[in-house]
Image (tube, rainbow, N blue to C red):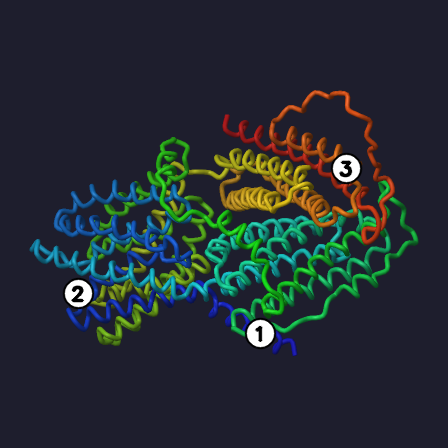
Amino acid sequence: MQLQSNFERYQREVLRIALSHYVTNGLSAALGLLLITGSIYLLLGEFAAAAASVGVVVCIPPDQPAPKRGKFWQLLPAFLIGLPLFWAVQVLHAAPILLGLLLVPASFLAFLAGGWGKRGLPISISVMFAMVFSMAVPDHTNSATNLATCLYFTLGAVFYLVWATLANAALNARYRVQMLADTLMALSKLMRSQAQQFSPEIAAETGKRAPLIGTLLQQQAALADQLLAARDILLESPSSTRRQQLANMLMLVLDMRDHLLVCNLDLDTLKSHSGHEPVLSALRDILQALADEIDALADALMLGRMPLPFASHRPQLENLQWEQSGTTPTNGAPPAILAMGMSSRIGLMNDDSLRLITLARGDVAPNVSLVRANWELFVSPTVWSWAPFYALWRWNAPPLRHAIRAALAIGTAYAVSLALPWGSHDYWILVTIVVVLRGSLAQTLERRNSRAIGTLIGCVVAGLLLYTHITPLLVLLVVTLAQAVAHAFALKKYLVTAVAATVLGLLQVQMLNAGPSPVFDVVERMLDTLMGVAIAWAFSYVLPSWERGQIAALVTRTLAAQARHARVALGLWQLQAVDNEPEIQWRLARREAFDSLSALVQATQRSLSEPRAVRPPLEPLGRLLALSYQLLAQLTTVKTMLLQQRGRLTPHEIDLPLQRTAQAIEAALGAVALPPQTDQPATTVLEWSVLGDPFDGDLSPWLLRRLQLADCIALQLRANGDQVVRELAAQHR
């Protein structure tokens, strides 16, 4: 029975991968390669097809699922920069010294594209591919032949630019569904990890929560990244009913993330009292059931099926009974009342899950006004800007240091390749450095291992294919399949990409210039890869951009984002607003808070692979991250009360606490001095010493409790932030 269950789970995972957006994108790129090079092969011959395939391969790295608007301009820089460099390498083919003098500065400029972040890195790869694969083209002494080769390259690149733009538009509807499904699965994964927090055996004093907290932080960051990619596609031009439906579902996912975030509130207090096990176990089971239902919805979307409705878990939540015996109030908050508040948050997630299902089934109409009010604000800009380029010219700028490091590594590798006794495929070492050397040591080490193992496997596969002397047309088909796999898994599973890329590279070279000994090519490929990996690894320590160098700026950004989020979430003006402007402002502030936290989590995670002597102070960083999410949770709860439960609040009793808490948090996190105290009219400040039923009655005591806890967390957050900055400064000295 267990074996069958494992097989079904494995089968389901394989199906999810096969139906994912990155596999669809990889197949689209491979089909474009096949159609373009196949047509040129039939019309102009084998060499023309091989040269044109290089133009296609150069344009493929930046071809990722993207909004329709700006897609062509996203791809164009790879061709515009790659073509002159491809031609220059052709001209200098017979002059190794001059070619080396071109490679080093060109590599420096190519890797500067990393200053544009995720948009720029694929351009770096494309530009380097243009030069490296140009070195694989046979040496032509005739300038007319060089020109013809460049024309074939241009033909392949231009056709692929058109193909990729049209394919992205044609697949836009499918990408929307796939990106939403991937986001739902990331949410369900986070829900399962959160459900483990409710397990009675996971108690704070056992030390078991520390790894789980780390996992939660990583999954929060992963979900933030997934939401960033999904919102750019799903929120673009929600003009049709289907687009509005999917966009509304994404907005619900954002709300569910907030509800999931606040599930940690009061959890430790509940666990410290006897009698908590039955209720927390029941809440864990309900949360896991909701995760299963979210997964089922994602699978239905992927398969194009109508999702099945599920029964609400509200009756289970309402029937939960807290064990009162043996419990004592803590700070005026009885555990039974806290447990009811916890079940209320799970109930909100249950309601949002039901709304997701009804939206997906088309049983309710999407909230068009909400979608249209938010889409332009949440879609990332698609135009290229010179601002990142101007910001690069600081000695401690990581993209600048990485560009210098990469140029030195390329120059060293090229000199080594010229000194090798075989020397016929000097570009293989360079290809390895291009794909292995990354801006951080953690990413380089991950690529190093995957590249070495994947190359060995790929060499065996390519060697077997070359031994059989397959026909050029069959070579083209295998190259197409290898390109699909390599492109699809480049960001997901680099080991798979390394295997496919090795097969692609060996067969690509065979198409351009078949060597006399395919067996030696395979052995040479293995040796060159190992040398390239070693050089990339060594140069990752040259002018290193240790993560601690950017941690201080990320901490400052995180605290500033938290301060702004507090100011917006606690603003009194939202209670009197007649439009959705407060909601939009809050969503923007919340996005920046999560984005800044995601960047800090990822930088901290990468630092774990660095030498111990240069790591940032991990202990206060961990506390800072945990406190940041706690503050977000407290303020999210307050925001929900203010907007959704305003009828159960007493305005004249909460106005002054709201104002004072917002000022206190901004003073703690944003370095803003508190205004001088002035005589104010007498105001009844409601105490929260006795909390009422969260399902019935006045919620003002609950809100006041959240405000006081948020104020305390902000002070702790500031203290941990200051400690991180001080220790970083001491390390620097």
For marks 1 and 3, give the one nearer the viewer. Answer: 3
Closer to the chain start, of discs 1 and 3, is 1
Mark 1–mark 3 Cα distance, whole angstroms, equals: 46 Å
Mark 2–mark 3 Cα distance, whole angstroms, equals: 75 Å
Mark 2–mark 1 Cα distance, whole angstroms, equals: 48 Å
Q: Residue at x 40, y 49 (%)?
A: 382
Using the rendered view, name the quadrant where residue 3 is placed.
bottom right
Mark 1, Cα crowd under 10 Å, few <14 / some 14-19 / many 20+, is few
Q: Nearer the viewer, residue 615 or 684?
A: 684
Mark 3, Cα crowd under 10 Å, few <14 / some 14-19 / many 20+, is many
Q: How many marks?
A: 3
The amino acid type of the residue labelled 3 equals Ile
SS at mark 3 in the image: helix
Which mark, by number, is residue 306? 1
Residue 550, image x, y percentages: 49, 36
Q: Is residue 318 visible?
A: yes
